[in-house]
Image (spheres, helix red, strand yellow):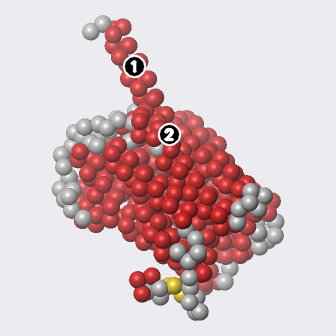
Amino acid sequence: MGTDTVRAESADEAAERRREQRGWYFYDWACSVYSTSVLTVFLGPYLTSVAKSAADADGFVHPLGIPVRAGSFFAYSVSLSVIVAVLVMPLVGAAADRTGRKKPLLAAAAYTGAAATTAMFFLGGDRYLLGGALLVVANAAQSVAMMLYNSYLPQIAPPEERDAVSARGWAFGYAAGALVLVVNLVLYTGHESFGLSESAAVRICLASAGLWWGAFALIPLRRLRDRRSASKATPGSTTPGFRQLAATVRDMRRHPLTLAFLLAYLVYNDGIQTVISQASIYGSEELGLGQSTLIGAVLLVQVLAVAGALGMGRLARIYGAKRTILGSLVAWTVTLAAGYFLPAGAPVWFFVLASGIGLVLGGSQALSRSLFSHLVPPGKEAEYFSAYEMSDRGMSWLGPLLFGITYQATGSYRDAIISLVAFFVVGFVLLARVPVRRAISDAGNPIPERI
């Protein structure tokens, strides 16, 4: 075969890879609106108000005859969705690796989640059970879809490109979240001028996230392609979720350095997720800030996370992903320490804190994903990313527990927020101890020049 022919084929392969990568970015663009507008901003307060309207005189609702305080219904629904996802993700991941047909499974999960989110338009009056059911379905489907989406990364990007590709994916997601949140906030704050009630405006915002998710999911589903799996079926791959998870963990024990990275990620990501979920409580209860300030801070985080993800992707090309992540954990620690000293009633300083969070949020998540992709044995991408996704979404309970216990013991949200520094310090130490080059080699993958 002539040199020109080889070069032509190489150029064609590179062009096809770029096209597939661009399609892959658009799934983050499609689904991140659900995380931002639905979960972070609108659904929690709205579903709680619906549950309260259905509550008895003592403030309880009774799903399946179980007394539940109306104010806790949203949190319990999120917890139930995590349990469902934990049961389903290992099964779907093993099936995807066994058959090599990820795309139909991704389509099923994405459109199940998008349909459930769109159906939130009908959440009104006292239909709290409908809202809880739709939340469980949408959130579990989102987790399953993200696991499949993440598992494409090692297949569509060679080792030297993964940090940049992963960072662009996160940047696309944060950009979409910011764009739609701006539109939603215009509709919500000006609902009277649009002839809408506040409830109708919220329901439109919720449903629009589902429509956006479904519409833009078409792009990755057209451009991503299935690859026939070269691996044999994993033992227990047709078993229920927890047994399949146990089989995956047993397999991961043959790659202890991969497991060591996953442990480090579990710890510091727990801190990240807790900061995200508790920052608004800290702002409202400890700093006395209004709802408009808090929503504005969420929007600022979304915008700056785009720049942060792209900027840290460039740093990773110079210093390697591991060092850049370690640097981000130092930045998280400094940000929390600054948050401890924020004066009450000073929204400007809260926006400064939000800026710090935004700049490190996207990059630390994007580079963690790309680094883990190097540690996954070939042919087991979806199965291993199911464990990664559960670390991301299903195991982040220690942080909120420590936050709550610290507040209960001290009565201070400042003490509660500074207690989360422990997750970043411990995560830093655990990650620093992982020899990533040897871990990549042990997993059977080529070692990039910078890692």
**Relative vertical location of residue 165 with respect to residue 294 in this rendering, above or below:** above
Q: What kind of element bears circle 1?
A: helix
User: Seen from this angle, which residue lies furthest bottom?
Assistant: 58
Q: Which mark is residue 372?
A: none
Rendered view: 310 above or below 386: above
> The disc labelled 2 sits on which kind of residue?
Tyr
- SS assignment at label 2: helix
Relative image position of residue 187 (x, y in whole percent): 71, 56
- Residue at position x 42%, y 51% in the image: 110
Residue 436 seen in the figure: no
Q: Position of residue 180 (x, y in %)?
A: 64, 50
Considering only order in the chain, which callout, 1 or 2, is on the residue closer to the N terminus?
Answer: 1
- For the point 52% across and 54% down, the residue is 210
Q: Is residue 117 visible?
A: yes
Front in this rendered view, residue 259 or 96: 96
Q: How far across and down, in percent of the image, does residue 273 sit?
A: 54, 62
Of the pair 181 and 334, the residue shown nearer to us: 181
Q: Which residue is mark 2?
A: 25
Q: Residues within 10 Å of mark 1 (few under 14, many from 20)?
A: few
**x and y, in percent, of residue 329 in the image:** 57, 55
Q: Is residue 178 above or below residue 5?
A: below
Residue at (56, 57) in percent of width and height: 207
**Callout 2: few (<14), some (14-19), or many (20+) C-alpha neighbours within 10 Å?**
many
| Residue situated in front as seen by the camera: 182 or 202 | 202
Residue behind mark 1 = 12
Quick check: 272 left or right of 434? right
Residue 228: quadrant of the picture: top left
Quadrant placement of the N terminus: top left
Q: Are marks 2 and 1 in contact (CB under 8 Å)?
A: no
